[in-house]
Amino acid sequence: MLLEILLTLAFGAAAYLYFFRKKEETLPIEDRWWGSGQKPDSEEDATVHPFKVETTDEELNDLFRRLDQARFTEPLEDSCFYYGINSVYLRKVVSYWRNQFNWKKQVEVLNKFPHFKTKIDGINVHFLHVKPPHLPEGHSAKPLLMVHGWPGSFYEFYKVISLLTDPASHGLSDEHIFEVICPSIPGYGFSEAPHKQGFDSVCAASVFYKLMLRLGFHEFYAQGGDWGWLICTNLAQIAPNHVKGLHLNLVSVLNMRFTQLLSILLGRYFPGLFGFQEEDVRRMFPFLKKGLYKMLMESGYAHIQATKPDTVGCGLNDSPVGLAAYILEKFSTWTDPEYRKLEDGGLERKYTLDDLLTNVMIYWVSGCMVSAMRFYKENIGKGIGTQKHDKKEESIPAATDGHRRASAPF
């Protein structure tokens, strides 16, 4: 009798799991043509070509002419960075850019790692591919995809690549050695911009998945910050059996549950009930001031870029000073909101002008600002929390270490 009961229960449980358990769904891979015009009938060339960053003297002379002719508006007294970038400091940046910054030297820095391009879904995709200089016996390198965001670039990762590919030379453990792939998001840096509407984070994730397969990586790890957070998350949703681990330094909660809503209302008074630590309480509360008001004060750029990116983008793409002002203000506030109290925005407390201007120059020489800003419209313009990937959970090992929306850890 007992055996019959156990067999019946086991059969029932098995039937329930087979027929009623929610099936694990993956996001579909986007197979669309992003090139100009109609998709050709011929098969796409999958060759991977070496690439080098290069700039002509003509391009530099044009830049210098524009810098020399820049018009500045005097800031309000004691306004620091509260109204955006302070033009007193901006003059200093432009003077350094024009008279001291050595772009040709920075091009040599950019080219110290091997660059490549390959055509995927009709557009040329630029990426770094850095292999370990040597591997200890019995070790194998872990493929690691690293994806940047806006207004950053592949240059974000330059000072950590050697730590990942050659840790022993930097006094670190060589237990984990990585083979690093850093692509430019299509429309950013030296990746071709999509020619069709609709290129969002899932499309970018699909392109990068195809890139990793083309490079021979059927299992790999992924790291993303800013837009790279969403792209790498979507990549894990597309190919959970291929992405072995996910690391993010930005996390967004789009579907708020009742307990999360309660934590906003009551977390200040009962932090332990919601697992909040003292630092969590300090950062979050009072929530209207530190959450909602802060978001409204600092999200104007996102609204512009999610609605009419080309209008502002065309102006930035035509003016190097405007481009620098727009980008550097974000680097200041996103590194530390308290830097708004400083006339120089605290930028040189964390970065060097060479690093900051190298990132700006990647946007300038590639002319990518408009297409980079369009990525906001393609993602946010569809509605926040309305897409299939917004509602899907990942089932792979994941970690995050980010509290702020800092864009570029140079």
Image (cartoon, rainbow, N blue to C red):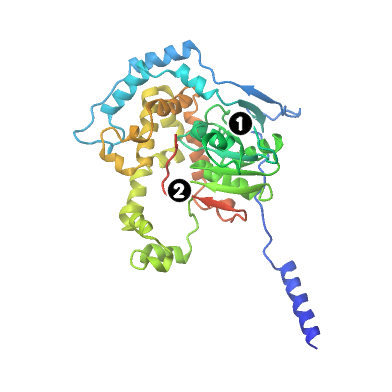
Residue ID for mark 1: 130
Compared with residue 132, is residue 251 higher up or lower down, i.e. above or below? below
Q: Position of residue 35 (x, y in %)?
A: 63, 29
Question: Which of 321 and 352 lies nearest the eye of the viewer?
Answer: 352
Number of labels in the image equals 2
> In the rendered view, does 143 fall on the left or right side of 15?
left
Q: For the N terminus, give its image quadrant.
A: bottom right
Q: Which mark is residue 105?
A: none
Q: For the C terminus, give its image quadrant.
A: top left
Q: Which mark is residue 402?
A: 2
Q: Where is residue 103 in the image (x, y as percent from the top left)?
A: 45, 19
Q: Most extreme residue toward the left, as rendered?
A: 77
Marks 1/2: CA–CA distance:
25 Å
User: What type is the residue that disc 2 sits on?
Assistant: Gly
Crowding near the residue tagged with mark 2, few <14, some 14–19, many ≥20 C-alpha atoms within 10 Å: few
Residue at image location 68% in from the left, 44% down from the top: 219
